[in-house]
Amino acid sequence: MDTQSATTFVTIARLGNFTQAAEELHYAQSTVTMQMQRLEKELGFPLFERIGRKTQLTAEGKEFLSYAERFLELSEGARRIGRDAKTMTGTLRVGILESLLFAKMLPILSEFRREFPNLEINLKIGQASELRSLLKQNQLDVIYISGSANTDPALRAQYRREEELVFAVDPAHPLAQKAPLSLSEIFEHPFIVTEPTGYCYGHLLELASEQDCELRHSVVLDSIIAICSLLSDRQSVAFLPRYALSEQVAAGRLSILDICAPKQMYYSQLLCAKDKWISPFIDALIQKIKSEYPEH
C-alpha cells in the first residue's frame, strides 16, 4: 500500500462515492477505480460493496479504514522529520567564491543561522573549477559560483541570476574622469587580474583579443578584496563583478568606468549534483538567496 492509494481509499470512505472522490482528488474516475482494485488485490479482500449507486464499506473495509488513517498519519509524521528549523540538526557544506561570500552570502548568513540554530555550516572558499570538482565528489552539498550558464549534465542549476562585469579604477585614476571610453583606451593601462583559470580573466583576455590589444598585468590575485585595495596605485584597472564593488563604489573608494561597448554579462548560480537529494536546509538556503537576490 502506498500513500496515494491510502488517501484515495480514505476519501472514498468519507464521501461514500467514487465520482466525488475522483473530483476532490483531481483524478480521472478510472484512476480511482484502478487504485482500489489494485489495493483490494494486494490486501486480499474487498473494501467496498457497490449496490446500485451506493458505495458502502465492507466489514473488512471498515476495519481497514482505521489502519489506513493511521498509516497516513505516520507517513505525514515521517515527512515532517527535519522540517522544524529550530530543532533540525546536520551539516550544510557550501562551496563559494570569495566575491559571492562577501557580497551576497555574509549579509544573509546571520539570519539563516538564527533560523537553523542547530545546523553546522561549513563554507569552502575556492575557485569555480575546484568547487565543481568537489561537488561531483560529494564533498560539498551545493556551490555558489559565477561564470557561464551551467551546461554540465552531472550538475543541476537550482538558481541562476544574470550579473554584470565592469571595469573599476581608483577615483583618482586618469580614466575615471573620462566618458565614454573605448575598450582600446582601457587596455592601454595595466591591469590587476584575477586567477588565470577564472571566468573574469578568460573573458578579459577575449575582449583584449577582439580589440587587437595586449593584456598587460603585473599582479595576479585570487582575492577581489586584495585587488580592490591594490587599485589605490591609481594606475591599474580591474575587471570584476559589479556586485562585488557596490560598497566600495558607494563609499567613493572605487569608480566604475563608463565604456562605449555592450554590457559584459554572465551568471551567478547555485549548483547541486544532478541526483542530489535537496534536504530541507539546502532548499531553505536556495530559497533565501532567491528571495534576497531574485533571478532575472
Image (cartoon, rainbow, N blue to C red):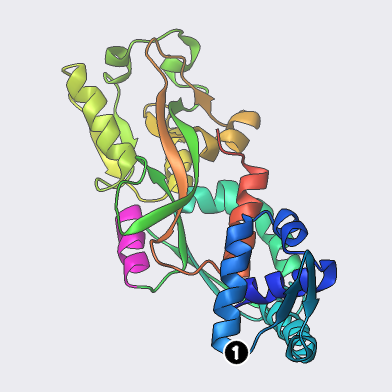
Q: Could you say whether the residue bearing mark 1 is in a helix, strand or loop?
A: helix
As rendered, which of 248 and 67 lies closer to the eye? 67
As rendered, which of 153 and 142 lies closer to the eye? 153
Task: Locate residue 15 relative to residue 288 in the image: left or right.
Answer: right
Residue 105 in percent (x, y) is at 59, 54
Q: Is residue 44 above or below residue 183?
A: below
Task: Locate residue 124 relative to residue 36 in the image: left or right.
Answer: left
In which quadrant is the C terminus drawn?
A: top right
Based on the picture, tell me whether residue 128 belongs to the magenta stretch.
yes
As rendered, which of 80 and 290 lies closer to the eye? 80
Residue at the (74%, 60%) spot, across then down: 111
Residue at the (48%, 34%) spot, across then down: 162
Q: Amino acid at mark 1?
A: Leu
Work out whether residue 84 can be spotted.
no
Write down the region rendered in magenta: 127-137
Residue 157 in percent (x, y) is at 44, 51
